[in-house]
Image (tube, rainbow, N blue to C red):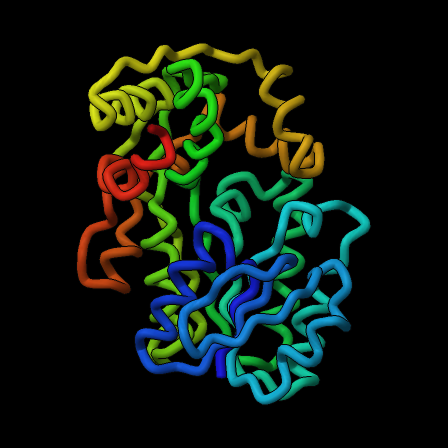
Amino acid sequence: MIVVTGATGNVGRPLTQALAKAGEQVTAVSRHAVAMPDGVRHVAADLAEPAILTPALDGAKALFLLLSGDLHAPEARPADIIGLAAASGVRRVVLLSSQGVATRPLGASRVAMRAVEDALRESGLDWAVLRPGGFASNALAWAESIRTQGTAAAPFGDVGVPVIDPADIAEVAAACLLDDRHTGGVYELTGPEVITPRQQAEAIAAALGSPVRFHELTRDEAKATMTRFVPAELADDTLDIISAPNPAELRISPDVERVLGRAPRPFDDWVARNIAVFR
């Protein structure tokens, strides 16, 4: 049995579906109950209280660990989840980390995530670490404004990074959970092309067949929005990257193709699959 945390999110949902389709027994963990694929058990739990995970981990052979925004706060103890998994008999953990652990190692949230990676390496468990860059699905933040006003707002409109389709992250995670060849692997996951926020808005407009006006936010405006959902340290670290990506953050990683045997999906593919939310 495989436990998937963050099972209702942009990575966890397709990962849960992929594992169930592969014939695996899956326990999906999220804060709130939602419809799951046939045969998937759901457990409502908040990872900020790791002990609540104990029933979900009973009998599990592997764990996909996705840390929600609040678990990046300075007072959080996400490494405790790894200890709980080991004590519960889990043999393998695949951790969704961040590209910034390598590219911005001194950022406050990156230091914390590095500590989680180190705890996993020292746990005695089989492990793999996924380090994605920016997510294509961050464009979902525009869904309401595009539907109601035909506008998309973001900072640094003409600064791009190679955003990754969450479905590709999910496929890589499934491979790491199911295939021993990926044990001890650290995979940097990016899309196939650098794309700016303005270009993302243009891609959505093209798929809609109607114009989308782009409004550029200041850094302070963007941070005010982001800190409604994530700690200020994580917001600042993210804004540092998207305002001035360094060469490592602009690099197109070969790791998706190494694991899956195909190139990562471009942003246009993500838009085509999700265009209904913008109509």
- Residue 62 image point, x, y percent: 51, 79
179 vs 232, left or right, is: left
For the C terminus, which image quadrant?
A: top left
- Viewer-side residue, 46 vs 256: 46
Numbered disc total: 0
Residue 193 in sight here: yes
**Residue 268 position within the rendered picture, expressed as x and y whole percent measured from the top left:** 23, 35
Is residue 214 or residue 252 the one in the foreground? 214
In the shown orientation, is residue 243 left or right of residue 89?
Answer: left
Q: Residue furthest right?
A: 75
* Position of 181 relative to 220 (above/below): below
Q: Write down the quadrant of residue 255 in the picture.
A: bottom left
The structure residue drawn at horizontal position 38% and vertical position 55%, both measured from the top left corner, is 169
- Within the image, what quadrant is residue 158 found in? top left
Looking at the image, is 100 positioned above or below residue 6? Answer: above
Q: Nearer the viewer, residue 85 or 115?
A: 85
Residue, x 46% and y 20% (percent of image)? 145
Please tell me which residue is depicted at 81% across the width and 50% down the height of the picture.
75
